[in-house]
Image (tube, rainbow, N blue to C red):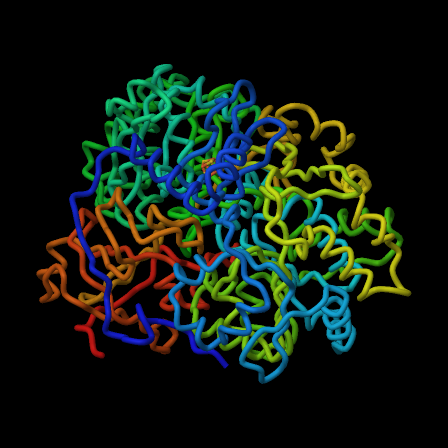
Amino acid sequence: MSELKEKPSAENPEELLDLKVTEPKDWAAGVPAVYEALKDIFGEAGLVRGIGASLKMNQKGGFDCSSCAWPDPDDDRSPIAEYCENGAKALAEEATTKKLTGEFFAQNSIAELAKLNDYEIGKKGRIAQPVYLPAGAAHYKTITWNDAFKMIADKLNSLASPDEAAFYTSGRTSNEASFMYQLFVREFGTNNMPDCSNMCHESSGTALSEVIGIGKGTVTLNDFYDTDVIVIMGQNPGTNHPRMLSALQKAKEKGSKIIAINPLQEAGLTAFKDPQTVKGFLGISTKLADLYLQVRINGDMALLKAIEKLLLDAEKDNPGKVFDREFIEGSTVGYNELIEHLGKQDVSKLCESAGVPIEQVREAAEMMKHKHRIIICWAMGVTQHVNGVDTIKEITNLVLLKGSIGKPGAGLCPVRGHSNVQGNRTMLIWEKLKGAQADKLKEIFGFEPPRKNGLDTVESIKAMHEGKLKFFFAMGGNFLSATPDTNYTADGLRKMDMTVHVSTKLNRSHLVHGAEALILPCYSRSDKDIINGVDQIVSCENSMGVVQSSKGVLKPISDQLLSETQIICRLAKATLDGRTKVDWDKYAYDYDAVRDLIAKVIPGCEDYNRKIRQPGGFYLPNGPREQKFKTEKYGDKAAFSVVELPVHNQGNDEFVMMSIRSHDQFNTTIYGLEDRYRGIHNERRVIFMNPKDIEKAGFKAGDKVDLYNHHDGRERVAKLFVIVSYNIPEGNTATYYPETNVLVPINLVAAGSNTPVSKAVMIKLRKHQA
Ligand code: SF4
């Protein structure tokens, strides 16, 4: 049984790397981004393989970047580099020529591998063969695909109920694989389909479905070039969606203003040096944020209410000039209730609660007062709070008051993190299969799908502890590192009879396993998938609802890899043989036939095979984009919401901690140990603190501390962090994810969406104890 590694090096728990702290940058990208991108691609893949792949990434007819879900331009794309530094790093990890064969696993026990940190594990290379860990064994060993499928099928068929299994999905899985995956799971008989969306934008989906009738954003990329004001909340695009900076720069050139709202002053929100322009290459930056509101962690709702109240006052002075009365009267409900609620608000108190000077809030309101083309973007800094769903309703209130929805240059923009996370949901990867969707599956396939809700991510982890789950299957991802309360989750996984991961590379989740475990290696997005001599395409949906094809270009590192679709179809055949209504053999090798199924089942995907082959793909239908609303509660109207401010109970010796990504990482994948925009080098176990807080707590920058959380009366500890003095609001701290997931309580979740609250964990600091 392997141990979780909580310290920098299990060989020497006191060891920290050589942390170097420099001044944070006030601009993003530039020549260093190009250098880092090329260094990584060529270093891992070599010159020929690296150049060949990079020229095809995010191109029409090429392959989709497997990193974030930021959209590609609808029209012309750069022929040289339609990708960013992080896209290049993701490609480098896929295109690496390092591969892990049976020999590697014979030489490296799980216990030995578990001593490595996540960065070192990830750098080992691509998994080249299916491998199996027998109960009690110390090493994975090779297994044939047929034996692997039979073993998993036998285990699934031995369960007392299909609900003893959970099937997780990470956001990389293609639409074709997602559709067949959910079909298999539903025919097997469960809705236990937790996914990564449960942990990121579930709050957005929950709020938006209720108030505008669709759980997605409403803007297109072109709206950014036709807008007056862009508000960016709780999002760090310079690291997490770097090509968004090009869109912001273009928006600025066209006259838009940008308001950034974030607890940290991020380089990527401040200024951008576009390395694809002469100006950027020469080091001349474009200022991005015109106004930077350095809000306190989770002060967003108070700030939004303050802005709305100031706009209401202005509307009273100039009726019909500030709010869009025609839109409000014709297309919304709940206006009077909201106005009554806003009327009772005290702007000074709201600003105090938000931690933003009132003058700056007035400036923000002034920037929006006479504008009606407003886009509001947000990400995890908004969604991963107890009141995440309510804050998104408050964002929607502001957009509805201004009539800034369903018209060019205006709308709501939840920026998705993983490349096909939105497509997974469109393809019915969700623990809540709706009645109409179940009816459709029954009509097309002739089996009775399960009707009761399955388990989401947090519920699945709890069910592992309660003995309700015995089997865990992960389609991609790094479940253990992505989820909260790491030690609790690890214990849950260890209670499983069997854990199975479909993966490209080794990760922590392979090393903390059930009694038996398998790793099934699959193609990455950039790998060629050739069937009967023909290069195959798959399809993905980006953050703005565009579905397009993706065709890999790289020779796979092993002939032992299968596509995710083939893995699912062959496993489904092995599991359901004799009782299935689906021709799994056919769909394993005919993705056009899979797409014909998608066309029959998923609204908006009619004629799917033709539409995804159009250069640039096609937009899925989106009613609110045309001011057409269809909500369950409010009929054909969008709804204003009256939501209450969160209560922050923070003891004198407590700090609010939010987890953040470094610039050298994407989700759980650690590309390197640099966070150059924030000036952190060669170490990840740091805690960013306000200098006044450091002094008040009796520490100094550079001190080593342990971090504690005591939610629900259980002590959680993350050991050995170095204090870094940083520009962050007093009382707030930031640490890197996934190192501090160990502190995120499993029971601290967003109301309504059950999303773990990774952005507001109450912690205490103590001097480090060995
Ligand atoms: S912005 Fe996102 S999708 Fe685009 S290249 Fe960068 S990481 Fe990939």
Say which quarter of the image contains residue 464: bottom right
Residue extending farthest to the bottom is 136
Q: Is residue 478 above or below residue 715?
A: above
Number of labels in the image equals 0
Residue at position x 57%, y 37% from top?
64
Q: Nearer the viewer, residue 392 or 6?
A: 6
Residue at position x 75%, y 70% from top?
147
Residue at position x 42%, y 34% from top?
84
Q: Residue 435: where, in percent of width, then height?
A: 75, 51
Left/right of residue 494 with respect to residue 306 in the rendered view:
right
Left/right of residue 35 with respect to residue 561 in the rendered view:
left
Q: Nearer the viewer, residue 589 or 722?
A: 589
Q: Residue 327: where, in percent of width, then height?
A: 52, 22
Residue extending farthest to the top is 254
Q: Is residue 511 above or below residue 94?
A: below
Q: Residue 73: where, in percent of width, then height?
A: 52, 24
Say which quarter of the image contains residue 423: top right
Left/right of residue 391 with respect to residue 445 in the rendered view:
left
Q: Residue 244: where, in percent of width, then height?
A: 42, 31
Name the quadrant of the C terminus: bottom left
Left/right of residue 288 with respect to residue 602 in the rendered view:
left
Q: Is residue 259 above or below residue 300?
A: above
Q: Nearer the viewer, residue 540 or 732?
A: 540
Q: Is residue 601 above or below residue 455?
A: above
